[in-house]
Image (tube, rainbow, N blue to C red):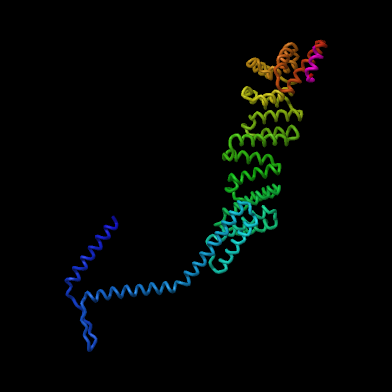
Amino acid sequence: MRAALWLLILFGVAVAGALFAGNNQGSVTLFWPPYRIDLSLNLVLLILVGAFLLVHTAIGALNALLDLPRQALRWRTQQKERAMHASLLDAFSHLIAGRYIRARKSAEAVLVQESSLTGSGQRPANASQLRAIAHLLAAETAQALQDRAAREDHLQRALEQASARDAQETRDGALLRAARWALEDRDPEAAMKLLQGLPQGAGRRTLALRTRLKASRQAGATPEALETARLLAKHHAFSDVAARSIVRGLAIDLLNGAYDIAQLQRAWVALEPAERQMPEVAIHAAQRLDTLRGDARVARDWLLPVWEEQAELGETLRTKLVCALEDGLDSIDATWLARIEAAQKANPRDATLQYLAGMACMKRQLWGKAQQLLTQAALGLQDPVLHRNAWRALAELAEQREDAPAAAQAWKRAAGE
C-alpha cells in the first residue's frame, strides 16, 4: 500500500513538472559586457538544483573525510570494549566450570583492558561497577585456590570501586560473598561483621538471612539463629516442612543452652506460641526441666497442649510423651490422673496408654488396677524401654503382695529372658 502511494505521488510530481516546464516561456538574460547570454528559465532552475546537490554532496564528503580519525578512534574503542567484555564472559565461564586459574587470568585481563581504555581517555560506561565485578571474580577464584591474601586484596579493591552510587548493588553482593567465604573458613564472627555492613533493606533479603542463619549457628548464637529462621519462614524461604524442622531444632538447642531452672523458663517464654506447641519442643522442655530437678507440675503444664493432641502423634512421639509424663508421676494430681484414665478408656487397646495409666495408678497406690493395666500393657508394648519398665513394675507389685514366683517371673521378663 505504501509503495502504491509513493508511485502515485511520483506520477503527480512528474505531471506537475511537465505542465510547468512545457508551458514555461520565461527566460533569464545575463549581461556580461560586452556579452549577453539568454537562458531559458527551465535550464536555470535545473542548474540551480544541480549546483545545490553538488555542494551538498561535497560538504557531506568533506565532513566524512574530517570525521575519519574520530570514527577510527571509536572503532578501536569498541574493539577494546568488546575484548574486555569477552574476557569478562570468559572469567564467568571458567569460574562456573571450575577452571579457576584461567578464570583468574581472564578477570585480571579485564582490569588491564579497562585501565588501558581509561588511560586513553575512553572511560567505559559503568567503569566502577565493571572493575568491582572483575575484582570480585578474581577474589572468588583466589578463594577457590585458597589464596587468602589475594582474595582479601581483590575484595578490598572491589569494595572501593563499588562505593559509587551506581555500584551499590555490586557492593552488597561483594559483602555477601565475603560473608560466605568467612563461613567457609569457619569464621562466623567475621561473617556477622560483614553482614552488619549491609544496608537495612539488603540485610533482610533472603540470601542475607540465609547467610546470617548459618553464621549464627556456627557461632552458637542460638537466639539470633532462631529469630533469623523465623524471618526466613515468614518469607517462605523454605518449604513448610523444612522451616518447621529448622525452627524446631533451634528451639531445642535454645532449651539445651539453659543450665538452671530460671534460664530454662526464660528460654521457654522466649519461644513463640506455635513453637511451644510443637510436640518435640514441649517434650524436650519437660525432660530438660526434670533433668534440672524442676517442678513436675510446670512440666505437665508445658505438656498439656501436646497431650490434648496425643491421638494424632506418631508412635515414637507418643512414647516420648509418656516417658516425659512418667518422670513426674510422683506428684501427679487428680486432674491429670483423670485425663490419663479418660484417654485410656477412649482407646482401651492402646498399650502405651495402658502403661501410663498403670504407672499412674501405681504411684497413687491403686495396686489392683495398676497390676491389671500393666499386665495388659506388658503384652502389647513394642518399645523396649517401656516393656522392661512394665515388667519391672509388675515385679515390684508381686513383691509387695509377697508372691515370690510371680516376682521372679516378672524380673526375668524384665531382663529379657
Q: 286 or 171, which lies in front?
A: 171
How many numbered circles are shown?
0
Dominant secondary-structure state across the stretch colored magenta: helix
The answer to whether residue 239 shows anywhere in this view is yes
Q: Position of residue 336 (x, y in %)?
A: 68, 19
At x 80%, y 10%, the residue is: 401
When the figure is inspected, residue 386 is found, relative to residue 61, above or below; the finding is: above
What quarter of the picture does the C terminus occupy?
Answer: top right
Residue at 64 percent of width and 45 percent of height: 212
Q: Where residue 318 sits: x, y (%)?
A: 67, 24
In magenta segment, residue 407: yes
Residue shown at the point (22%, 89%) measured from the top left: 34
Residue at 65% of width from left, 16% of height from top? 349
Question: For this view, does 98 lie left or right of residue 403?
Answer: left
Q: Up-down: is 36 above or below 294?
A: below
In the orientation shown, which residue stands out farthest toward the bottom? 34
Rendering quarter of residue 305: top right
Q: Position of residue 84 (x, y in %)?
A: 56, 61
Tell which of 184 and 338 is nearer to you. Answer: 184
In the foreground, 357 or 395: 395
Q: Is residue 246 magenta?
A: no
Q: Quadrant of the N terminus?
A: bottom left
Residue 400: percent from left, percent from top: 81, 12
Residue 378 versus residue 98 in the image, above or below: above
User: Is any atom of residue 159 visible in this view?
Assistant: no
The magenta segment is 406-416
In the displayed structure, 171 sits above or below 412; it is below
